[in-house]
Image: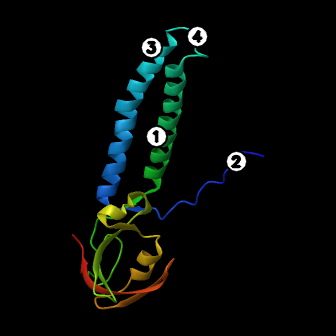
Amino acid sequence: MSRYRPPRPAGTPLITPEGEARLRAELHELWHVKRPQVTQSVSEAAAQGDRSENAEYTYGKKMLREIDSRVRFLTKRLEKLKVVGERPSDPNKVYFGAWVTLEDEDGEEARYRIVGPDELDLRQGLISIDSPLARALVGKTLDAEVQVQTPTGLKLWYVVAIDYL
Protein backbone atom coordinates (compact mmCIF):
# COMPACT_ATOMS: atom_id res chain seq x y z
CA MET A 1 0.00 0.00 0.00
CA SER A 2 1.44 3.37 -0.97
CA ARG A 3 1.61 6.51 1.13
CA TYR A 4 0.43 8.69 -1.75
CA ARG A 5 -2.23 11.23 -0.90
CA PRO A 6 -3.73 13.34 -3.64
CA PRO A 7 -3.22 17.06 -3.08
CA ARG A 8 -6.12 18.81 -1.42
CA PRO A 9 -8.04 21.11 -3.72
CA ALA A 10 -6.79 24.67 -3.47
CA GLY A 11 -9.27 27.09 -2.00
CA THR A 12 -10.41 30.32 -3.58
CA PRO A 13 -7.30 32.44 -4.27
CA LEU A 14 -8.62 35.52 -2.45
CA ILE A 15 -7.23 37.07 0.72
CA THR A 16 -7.69 40.25 2.73
CA PRO A 17 -4.71 42.60 3.26
CA GLU A 18 -4.60 41.57 6.94
CA GLY A 19 -4.50 37.88 6.01
CA GLU A 20 -1.71 38.44 3.52
CA ALA A 21 0.29 40.31 6.17
CA ARG A 22 -0.14 37.39 8.59
CA LEU A 23 1.04 34.85 6.00
CA ARG A 24 4.04 37.01 5.06
CA ALA A 25 4.91 37.43 8.76
CA GLU A 26 4.72 33.66 9.26
CA LEU A 27 6.96 33.09 6.22
CA HIS A 28 9.48 35.65 7.50
CA GLU A 29 9.46 34.11 10.99
CA LEU A 30 10.02 30.60 9.64
CA TRP A 31 12.74 31.53 7.14
CA HIS A 32 14.69 34.19 9.02
CA VAL A 33 14.24 33.17 12.68
CA LYS A 34 13.23 29.54 13.23
CA ARG A 35 15.12 27.87 10.39
CA PRO A 36 18.52 29.38 11.33
CA GLN A 37 17.96 28.35 14.98
CA VAL A 38 17.06 24.77 14.06
CA THR A 39 19.94 24.59 11.56
CA GLN A 40 22.36 25.68 14.30
CA SER A 41 21.03 23.08 16.75
CA VAL A 42 21.26 20.33 14.09
CA SER A 43 24.82 21.38 13.34
CA GLU A 44 25.73 21.21 17.03
CA ALA A 45 24.02 17.80 17.40
CA ALA A 46 25.84 16.46 14.34
CA ALA A 47 29.18 17.52 15.83
CA GLN A 48 28.56 15.27 18.85
CA GLY A 49 29.29 12.14 16.86
CA ASP A 50 27.11 9.11 16.12
CA ARG A 51 24.02 10.47 14.36
CA SER A 52 22.10 7.19 14.32
CA GLU A 53 21.48 7.33 18.07
CA ASN A 54 21.36 11.11 18.43
CA ALA A 55 17.76 12.13 19.20
CA GLU A 56 18.53 15.86 18.97
CA TYR A 57 19.91 15.40 15.46
CA THR A 58 16.95 13.27 14.32
CA TYR A 59 14.39 15.64 15.81
CA GLY A 60 16.18 18.69 14.36
CA LYS A 61 16.21 17.18 10.85
CA LYS A 62 12.50 16.44 11.18
CA MET A 63 11.84 20.04 12.24
CA LEU A 64 13.84 21.31 9.24
CA ARG A 65 11.74 19.18 6.87
CA GLU A 66 8.52 20.56 8.41
CA ILE A 67 9.75 24.15 8.23
CA ASP A 68 10.91 23.74 4.62
CA SER A 69 7.59 22.17 3.67
CA ARG A 70 5.62 25.07 5.19
CA VAL A 71 7.94 27.64 3.57
CA ARG A 72 7.41 26.01 0.16
CA PHE A 73 3.64 26.00 0.67
CA LEU A 74 3.51 29.65 1.81
CA THR A 75 5.77 30.82 -1.03
CA LYS A 76 3.66 29.11 -3.70
CA ARG A 77 0.37 30.15 -2.09
CA LEU A 78 1.36 33.81 -1.76
CA GLU A 79 2.27 33.89 -5.47
CA LYS A 80 -1.25 32.74 -6.42
CA LEU A 81 -3.28 34.86 -3.99
CA LYS A 82 -5.15 37.99 -5.03
CA VAL A 83 -5.38 40.62 -2.30
CA VAL A 84 -8.85 42.18 -2.13
CA GLY A 85 -8.61 45.43 -0.22
CA GLU A 86 -11.02 47.76 -1.96
CA ARG A 87 -14.64 48.14 -0.97
CA PRO A 88 -17.27 46.84 -3.40
CA SER A 89 -19.22 49.25 -5.59
CA ASP A 90 -22.45 48.30 -3.79
CA PRO A 91 -21.81 48.22 0.00
CA ASN A 92 -25.42 47.20 0.65
CA LYS A 93 -24.71 43.66 -0.59
CA VAL A 94 -22.58 40.95 0.96
CA TYR A 95 -19.27 40.35 -0.82
CA PHE A 96 -15.78 39.16 0.08
CA GLY A 97 -14.41 40.98 3.14
CA ALA A 98 -17.82 41.94 4.56
CA TRP A 99 -18.70 41.76 8.23
CA VAL A 100 -22.21 40.27 8.32
CA THR A 101 -24.46 40.20 11.38
CA LEU A 102 -26.99 37.38 11.25
CA GLU A 103 -30.02 36.66 13.42
CA ASP A 104 -31.44 33.17 13.69
CA GLU A 105 -35.05 32.14 14.30
CA ASP A 106 -34.52 32.28 18.08
CA GLY A 107 -33.35 35.89 17.95
CA GLU A 108 -29.68 35.09 18.64
CA GLU A 109 -27.16 37.17 16.71
CA ALA A 110 -23.83 36.13 15.27
CA ARG A 111 -21.26 38.25 13.42
CA TYR A 112 -18.98 36.82 10.72
CA ARG A 113 -16.47 38.18 8.25
CA ILE A 114 -16.15 36.50 4.86
CA VAL A 115 -12.45 35.91 4.18
CA GLY A 116 -10.21 33.61 2.15
CA PRO A 117 -9.67 29.96 3.13
CA ASP A 118 -6.16 30.75 4.41
CA GLU A 119 -7.58 33.11 7.06
CA LEU A 120 -10.29 30.88 8.53
CA ASP A 121 -10.67 31.36 12.31
CA LEU A 122 -14.10 30.74 13.84
CA ARG A 123 -13.04 32.09 17.26
CA GLN A 124 -12.55 35.50 15.64
CA GLY A 125 -15.69 35.17 13.51
CA LEU A 126 -13.79 34.66 10.24
CA ILE A 127 -15.45 32.23 7.84
CA SER A 128 -14.09 31.03 4.51
CA ILE A 129 -15.69 32.21 1.30
CA ASP A 130 -15.75 28.52 0.35
CA SER A 131 -18.02 27.60 3.30
CA PRO A 132 -21.70 26.86 2.68
CA LEU A 133 -22.80 29.80 4.85
CA ALA A 134 -20.57 32.30 3.04
CA ARG A 135 -21.62 30.99 -0.38
CA ALA A 136 -25.26 31.45 0.65
CA LEU A 137 -24.56 34.99 1.93
CA VAL A 138 -22.69 36.37 -1.09
CA GLY A 139 -24.89 38.75 -3.04
CA LYS A 140 -27.56 39.03 -0.33
CA THR A 141 -28.84 42.40 0.89
CA LEU A 142 -30.00 43.70 4.24
CA ASP A 143 -33.02 41.82 5.69
CA ALA A 144 -32.47 38.91 3.29
CA GLU A 145 -33.33 35.41 4.38
CA VAL A 146 -30.56 32.79 4.13
CA GLN A 147 -31.08 29.04 4.35
CA VAL A 148 -28.12 26.71 4.84
CA GLN A 149 -28.03 22.94 5.20
CA THR A 150 -26.01 22.14 8.35
CA PRO A 151 -25.18 18.77 9.94
CA THR A 152 -28.05 19.35 12.38
CA GLY A 153 -30.51 20.19 9.62
CA LEU A 154 -31.70 23.20 7.64
CA LYS A 155 -30.90 26.48 9.40
CA LEU A 156 -32.49 29.86 8.68
CA TRP A 157 -30.80 33.25 9.25
CA TYR A 158 -31.69 36.85 8.49
CA VAL A 159 -29.10 39.43 7.45
CA VAL A 160 -29.28 42.20 10.09
CA ALA A 161 -26.20 44.29 9.22
CA ILE A 162 -23.48 44.52 6.58
CA ASP A 163 -20.23 46.40 7.26
CA TYR A 164 -17.03 46.90 5.32
CA LEU A 165 -14.44 48.18 7.78
Residue flagged by tag 1: what amino acid is it? Val
Please give the residue where the numbered disc 3 appears in the rendered image. Answer: 44
4 and 1 marks in contact (CB < 8 Å):
no
How far apart marks 1 and 3 lie (CA) works out to: 23 Å
As drawn, the label of residue 4 is: 2
- In which quadrant is the C terminus drawn? bottom left
In the image, taking residue 153 as reference, residue 15 lies left or right, namely left
How far apart marks 4 and 3 lie (CA) works out to: 12 Å
In the image, taking residue 117 as reference, residue 92 lies left or right, namely left
Quick one: label 4, few (<14), some, or many (20+) residues within 10 Å?
Answer: few
Please give the residue where the numbered disc 1 appears in the rendered image. Answer: 71
2 and 1 marks in contact (CB < 8 Å):
no
Residue flagged by tag 2: what amino acid is it? Tyr
Whole-percent x, y for residue 156 in the image: 40, 88
**Which is in the foreground here, disc 4 or disc 3?**
4
Quarter assignment of residue 2: top right
Quick one: label 2, few (<14), some, or many (20+) residues within 10 Å?
Answer: few
Please give the residue where the numbered disc 4 appears in the rendered image. Answer: 50
Q: Nearer the viewer, residue 151 or 159?
A: 151
How far apart marks 3 and 2 lie (CA) works out to: 34 Å
Dot 4 lies on which element? loop
Whole-percent x, y for residue 161 in the image: 24, 82
What residue is shown at x 33% (from left), y 56% (from top)? 19
